[in-house]
Amino acid sequence: MQAGMESLSFTLPGRKPLPAGFATVLVGVVASGNLEVMVELATGSDCTFEVATSARGFGSIWEAVVRDFHDRHGLAGARVSINDMGATPAVVSLRLDQAAAGLP
Amino acid sequence: MNAPLPWNRRAQRREARLARVTSALGTALRGKQVDATQAVALLEAALEPGDRVCLEGNNQKQADFLADALVQVDPARVHDLHMVQSVLSLPQHLDVFESGIASKLDFSFSGPQSQRLARLVSQGRLQIGAIHTYLELFSRYFVDLTPQVALVAAQAADREGNLYTGPNTEDTPAIVEATAFSGGLVIAQVNEIVDRVPRVDIPAGWVDYVVPAPKPHWIEPLFTRDPAQISEVQVLMAMMAIKGIYAAYGVQRLNHGIGFDTAAIELLLPTYAESLGLKGKICQHWALNPHPALIPAIEAGWVESIHSFGSELGMEDYIRARSDVFFTGPDGSMRSNRAFCQAAGHYACDLFIGSTLQMDLAGNSSTATLGRIAGFGGAPNMGADARGRRHASDAWLKAGQQARTGRGGASGTPRGQKLVVQIVETFREHMQPAFVEKLDAWTLAEQAGMPLPPIMIYGEDVTHVLTEEGLANLLLCRSDEEREQAIRGVAGYTAVGLARDRRMVENLRDRGVIQRPADLGIDPRDASRNLLAARSMRDLVRASGGLYRPPARFRNW
């Protein structure tokens, strides 16, 4: 991880398991005001979110954004990795929903 | 019986000024024409201490050569001027206060000079009379802030002193009329002297001196927005504006702010709005500067008419070639007029949509932030219900009905209402929240000793708040509490948004007070930049058939 980045991690109980043989989904780009979201298969029934962000000190907002996304989709057995370069919550939510739309 | 009072003191004072100039300039004065090298001498002879002076600082066009000259006058001869000008744009506009040439200021907008203005006020070197809207300041030119001397800018003059302002007429007619008909002096800087002006924008009889300036006056291309910088979130909000407001009310007559959010709307008309079958049903008449972003909609036949406050650099030939749409003279070039266009936006438009920096829980919005006195410009004239309006339109009647249904007495008397929309992303760049418990304007008012906080658009006038999270229709709110929750309900992940009463917000959504993108039949994932009718400056040039010529700074090819 780069210096000055903040890393955050959230684990939430899932409802909808990803299908077996699911291929990784990647949306977005790491650029100023933007972010990259990757969804992968993981063991267990939780959904874990690993956030690396260049904007420090916004942990509570990330938690709220991630919880709302999880309320909408409830992925189980999934790992969601986020590389963020100062995107606003609006852009983060949009990318997360785009990633979820790419799921089978 | 007393000796008769002199009733022509203004005329006498005017004669004295003219005589001083004649004697100071000697042979350097030929008719009304003054050599550029004598500009400082002209001002020193014409001006008197304490004069009210309008130095034409417009939103775009600047009398920059005369501003340079004013800075150079001897403060022992000319001091304590009271500047009455709409825009403080150039450093010279504040330099005159540093040197004591001027001491008092009444103005409308100070965008680029807002920080330095705040500093001068806190140092006590500058006293602000009031911060106005454009129309309000122009109105005061005819009541109690009439200029004794006006320093204006024009494109060309003939040898008689007739002025051609070119497309950027802007404030000039209002300034000159107030000055010339009250015994004042009108001094114009011009880019060139010609035998015959293409058309007379200001008649020679209203002009006292003409100074050919060494270089053309400065104009700022303030309304050019590069489509390449429009984000998907702005596309989403533009889709919501078109479907949730323009289509819902049938908005035919409108004004847009200058931000990227509204540029996105302009660029979605020939694509997204066309796909909804809205052509001819919305957006036919505009009070708007010639926004390059509107070119694709004009070319697709969406637009019937546009009247403008000022012009926009690079749009001259395009405007000339689309004279059915723009207001142009017999010579073919555009005639703008800020005062008339502000009146048109206020009285004859059904909708204003623009952005802001901060909004509070009552819906009050402000672009004043700590350490900056930015002023208002024209937004409050556009973004206010026109209480003097009496003619009806579908959009105006529907808004009025929504606001008044169920009320009695005076507040239930049927009348229409202007749609005033604030379009904001919940967070600006660097994660600055757009929604706050208390506007910075309150602190600024305390620090600068203002009688009121500088609120740009009052919550009472705002009808809709549009963010990426949703659209709040404040017309349907029936209490301050509902209004607060409607605003919190679209404030996203800001502290204001997170503190919402979730049950009340869901109830407001059930009543249609709050509409999410899904409620409008919009999937945020469809909000793609591919919907924009132009995605770059080059696309805009292409859409114009090569008639639009953007300034160099906007060209990367």
Image (spheres, helix red, strand yellow):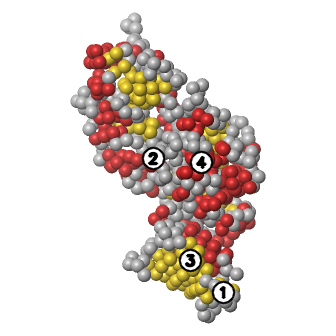
Residue that mark 2 sits on: B552
Q: Name the front one of labels 3 and 1.
A: 1
The Cα–Cα distance between marks 4 and 2, rounded to whole angstroms, is: 16 Å
Q: Report the amino acid beneath label 4.
A: Arg
Q: Is residue B337 above or below residue B226?
A: above
Query: Which is more toward the observer, B533 or B119?
Result: B533
A5 to the left or right of B365: left
Q: Report the amino acid beneath label 1.
A: Phe
Q: Residue furthest bottom?
A: A44
The Cα–Cα distance between marks 4 and 1, rounded to whole angstroms, is: 44 Å
Q: Position of residue B433 (x, y in %)?
A: 50, 63
Q: Name the front one of labels 2 and 1.
A: 2
The Cα–Cα distance between marks 3 and 1, rounded to whole angstroms, is: 16 Å
Q: Mark 2 falls on what kind of element?
A: helix
Read off the chain for label 4.
B
Read off the chain for label 3.
A
Read off the chain for label 2.
B
Residue that mark 3 sits on: A37
Q: Position of residue B389 (x, y in %)?
A: 67, 37
Residue positioned 45% across, 47% down in the render: B552
B15 to the left or right of A9: left
Q: Report the amino acid beneath label 2.
A: Ala
Q: Report the amino acid beneath label 3.
A: Val
Q: Mark 3 falls on what kind of element?
A: strand
Could you tell me if the residues under marks 3 and 1 are in contact, i.e. CB atoms within 8 Å?
no
Q: Name the front one of labels 4 and 1.
A: 4
Badge 2, how many Cα within 10 Å: few under 14, some, many 20+?
Answer: few
Residue that mark 1 sits on: A22
Q: Residue furthest left?
A: B76
Could you tell me if the residues under marks 2 and 1 are in contact, i.e. CB atoms within 8 Å?
no
Q: Is residue B430 above or below residue B192?
A: below
